[in-house]
Image (tube, helix red, strand yellow):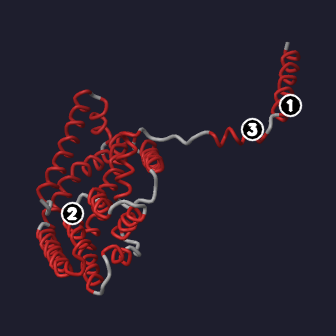
Amino acid sequence: MTTVLAGAGLVVALGLGRAAWRAPARERARRARAQEPRRLPARLRDPLARALTEAQCPVGPEDAVSGVCIAVLGVTFPVVVLASALAPVVFVTAVAAGPIFLVNARARVRRRYLVDLPGLVELLAARLRSGHTVVTALGDAAGGADPVASDLRGLLARHDHGEPFTDALEWWARRRPLPPLRAVAGALAVASVTGGAAAEALDGLARSLRDQLGAQAEALAQSAQARLSAVVVGAAPLGYLAFAALVDPGSVGLLLTTGVGRVCLVVGLALDAVAVVWMRRIVRSEP
């Protein structure tokens, strides 16, 4: 029986190998190219793509999700081996780190955007005084690598393809829903009609934007201690939980192995998250 099975297996293997040898490689390559990469659902992909664009992250939504998943597994696996009781907390923290990083990156880009707007308005006012139109002045300002210049290139591209200039400005204001930017877009819409006569108004707008940034910077400086306290208060429970898991794993095991412990853990983490959001809103300098 063993000899028969071995012989039959050899015959089948030779037949499969012969069939594979005769299969056209070109057809296999065509079928491989025809397979489309997996994409996230539209409800998740569109907001994530918009957030990545606003944060100036040069990756797609699928690559971002894959990177976060790999990072979460890479961080959680050693903890499972060394301190299994701490693994759920580390897993949740690692999963939350991705969205937190994205939110902070968007905030940094937003602050840089607001800081660059007054200089842009002053440059446009100077160009208008020298005889340029608003469109050519924007072309001079669109050569940089900052987020403002990137948006200006998109605005000019839409205008070059036949879209009215005011509609392109409206697209710009929708792309970056910032009150100062809406004021700049409105001023440029007026300047596109009045020409060089709007230079003084643009200078006044630039001074107003700088005054607003100065007030916000002063508010941030005065609230620095409060913001640091908010970070400490929010991170202290997680730090104590990690310390307890390393020093006395049995105490943390009660949180994970008993029903009451799980309820206490979930409620505690939820209250800590609510406290962090609440304190962030309290110390936020902008309305």
Q: Which residue is mark 1?
A: 18
- Of label 1 and label 2, which has the lower sequence position? 1
Above/below status of 111 relative to 45:
below
56 displayed left or right of 260 = right
218 displayed left or right of 194 = left
Q: Position of residue 42 (x, y in %)?
A: 40, 40
The residue mark sitting in front, 3 or 1, is: 3
Mark 2 and mark 3: span between their CA atoms? 55 Å
Q: Which residue is mark 3?
A: 27
Mark 3 and mark 1: span between their CA atoms? 17 Å
Q: Nearer the viewer, residue 9 or 60?
A: 60
Q: Which residue is mark 2?
A: 182
Q: Quadrant of residue 155?
A: bottom left
Q: Nearer the viewer, residue 128 or 212?
A: 128
Q: Quadrant of the N terminus?
A: top right
Above/below status of 35 relative to 230:
above
| Residue positioned 17% across, 76% down in the render | 210
Q: Amino acid at mark 2?
A: Arg
Q: Amino acid at mark 3?
A: Glu
Q: Quadrant of residue 223?
A: bottom left
Q: Amino acid at mark 1?
A: Arg
Q: Quadrant of the C terminus?
A: bottom left
